[in-house]
C-alpha cells in the first residue's frame, strides 16, 4: 500500500532473533546485552500469520535478519514456509555468514531468493577486531558455498576509516567471488561502545578513492533487489559497486519498507522510536482484520525522513534488524 507521502511500501524486514554469535563494534556492546526472553519472541507460526496478513495490503517481499538469523533453530524451515505464502515473491536474508557453509545447500533447496553477507575486511586480524573475535575463514567459506549453490549473493561492507584502504581489494574480491558488493555508511548507534575515533567515512570519499584506483567510473541505473543502494559502474573492472549513503544522502523518499522485531513490534522506520505491538494483537486472537489494521497504522506513521546524523542514535540494530 502507499503511505501518506505516496511511497509504495511492499517490503517487510523481519528480525527473527536479537541474539548473535559476533559482537561487531558498531552494532552491539561486548558484554551485558540484555536479550529478549524466549516467551516474548514471536513463534514461527506467528510470523507466518503476520506475513499472510501483510500480503493483503501489498507486502510481497520479506527479508530475514537479526541478530544472526541462522542462529535461530529452524530458520531454513521458516524460509520454506514464507516461500509458500501466496503473494510473497521474494524471501531473502541478511547474515554474518559464519554459519553459511553449514546451511547454504538447505537455503538453496528452501528456495531463498538471495542473501546478503556482511564482510567489512579481508584481513583476519582486522575481522577479529571489528567482530570481536570472529573467524573470517568461516565467512569466506560460507560465501563460496552460497555462490557454489547458485544463490545470488551480495556483500555488505560497513564503510569505516578502518577499512577504507581495503575498498579496492574488497571490490576485486567480490568480482572474483561472483558476488555484488555494497558499501554502507556507518550509522552511529547508542548501543555500541564509545569508539575512540569516529569511524564515519562518507560515500563521497569512497567514490573518490574508487575513481583514483580504477579510473573511469559512471553512475548507472542498475538496481538489484529491494535495497536502497545506488550503483556505480567501474569500466576497467566491468563491475557494479553499490553505495548506501544512509547518512550523507538519505534515501527516505525511496523508502519501501517496514520492520518486524523479534518480539513482535512493527517499526515504521529504523530510526524512529515509534512501534506497534502486533504480538499483543495476535495473541489476543482478535483475527486477521486487527492484524492488518496494525500494519496499516504502522505504514501510515512512516515519517517523511529520518533525522540520523553524526549524533548517536538510540537504535539497537540487533533487535530491530539492520
Ligand atoms: N547479523 C547479520 C549481519 O551482520 O549481516 C544481520 C543483522 S545486522 C544488524 C544487519 C546489517 O546491519 C549488517 O550488514 C550490518 O553490517 C549492519 N549494521 C549494523 N550496525 C551498523 C551500523 N552502526 N551502521 C551501519 N550498518 C550497520
Ligand atoms: Fe551480529 Fe550482525 Fe550486529 Fe555483527 S552486525 S553484531 S553480526 S547482528
Image: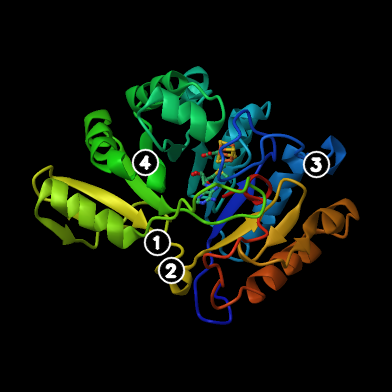
Image quadrant, ligand 2: top right
Name the residue at 52% across, 22% down.
103
Residue for badge 2: 251
Labelled pair 3, 4 in contact (Cβ < 8 Å): no
Mark toward the start of the polypeptide (1 vs 3):
3
Query: Which residue is the site of mark 3?
Result: 36
Q: Are marks 1 and 4 in contact (CB under 8 Å)?
A: no
User: Circles 2 and 1: CB distance less than 8 Å?
Assistant: yes
Give me the disc on residue 245.
1
Residue under the point 29% across and 38% down: 166
Looking at the image, is mark 3 or mark 4 earlier in the sequence?
Answer: 3
Near mark 3 (Cα within 10 A), the count class, few <14, some 14-19 or many ≥20, is: some
Give SS at disc 1: loop
Does label 3 or label 2 sit earlier along the sequence? Answer: 3
Label 3 – label 2 distance at C-alpha: 31 Å
Distance from disc 1 to disc 4, alpha carbons, whole Å, reads 16 Å
Residue 163 - label:
4
Residue located 46% across and 50% down the image: 199
* Residue 143, percent from left and from top: 39, 27
Q: Quadrant of the N terminus?
A: bottom right
**Front one among 163 and 178:** 163
Amino acid at each position: 500500500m502507499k503511505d501518506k507521502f505516496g511511497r509504495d511500501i511492499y517490503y517487510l524486514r523481519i528480525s527473527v532473533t536479537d541474539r548473535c554469535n559476533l559482537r561487531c563494534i558498531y552494532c552491539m556492546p561486548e558484554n551485558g546485552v540484555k536479550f529478549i526472553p524466549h516467551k516474548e519472541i514471536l513463534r514461527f507460526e506467528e510470523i507466518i500469520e503476520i506475513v499472510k496478513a501483510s500480503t493483503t495490503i501489498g507486502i510481497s517481499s520479506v527479508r530475514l535478519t537479526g541478530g544472526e538469523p541462522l542462529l535461530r533453530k529452524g530458520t531454513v524451515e521458516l524460509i520454506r514456509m514464507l516461500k509458500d505464502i501466496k503473494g510473497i515473491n521474494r524471501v531473502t536474508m541478511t547474515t554474518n555468514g559464519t554459519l553459511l557453509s553449514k546451511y547454504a545447500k538447505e537455503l538453496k533447496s528452501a528456495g531463498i531468493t538471495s542473501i546478503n553477507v556482511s564482510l567489512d575486511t579481508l584481513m583476519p586480524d582486522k575481522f577479529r577486531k571489528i567482530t570481536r573475535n570472529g573467524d573470517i575463514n568461516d565467512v569466506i567459506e560460507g560465501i563460496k558455498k552460497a555462490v557454489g549453490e547458485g544463490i545470488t549473493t551480495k556483500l555488505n561492507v560497513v564503510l569505516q576509516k578502518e577499512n577504507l584502504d581495503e575498498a579496492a581489494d574488497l571490490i576485486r574480491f567480490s568480482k572474483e567471488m561472483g558476488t555484488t558488493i555494497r558499501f554502507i555508511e556507518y550509522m552511529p548507534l547508542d548501543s555500541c561502545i564509545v569508539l575512540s575515533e569516529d569511524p564515519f567515512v562518507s560515500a563521497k570519499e569512497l567514490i573518490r578513492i574508487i575513481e583514483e584506483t580504477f579510473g573511469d567510473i559512471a553512475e548507472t541505473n542498475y538496481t538489484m533487489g529491494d535495497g536502497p543502494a545506488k550503483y556505480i559502474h567501474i569500466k576497467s573492472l566491468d563491475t557494479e559497486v553499490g553505495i548506501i549513503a544512509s547518512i550523507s544522502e538519505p534515501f527516505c523518499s525511496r523508502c519501501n519498507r517496514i520492520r518486524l522485531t523479534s518480539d513482535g513490534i512493527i517499526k515504521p522506520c529504523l530510526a524512529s522510536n515509534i512501534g506497534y505491538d502486533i504480538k499483543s494483537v495476535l495473541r489476543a486472537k482478535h483475527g486477521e482484520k486487527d492484524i492488518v489494521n496494525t500494519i496499516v497504522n504502522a505504514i501510515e506513521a512512516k515519517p517523511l525522513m529520518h533525522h540520523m546524523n553524526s549524533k548517536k542514535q538510540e537504535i539497537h540494530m540487533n533487535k530491530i534488524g539492520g
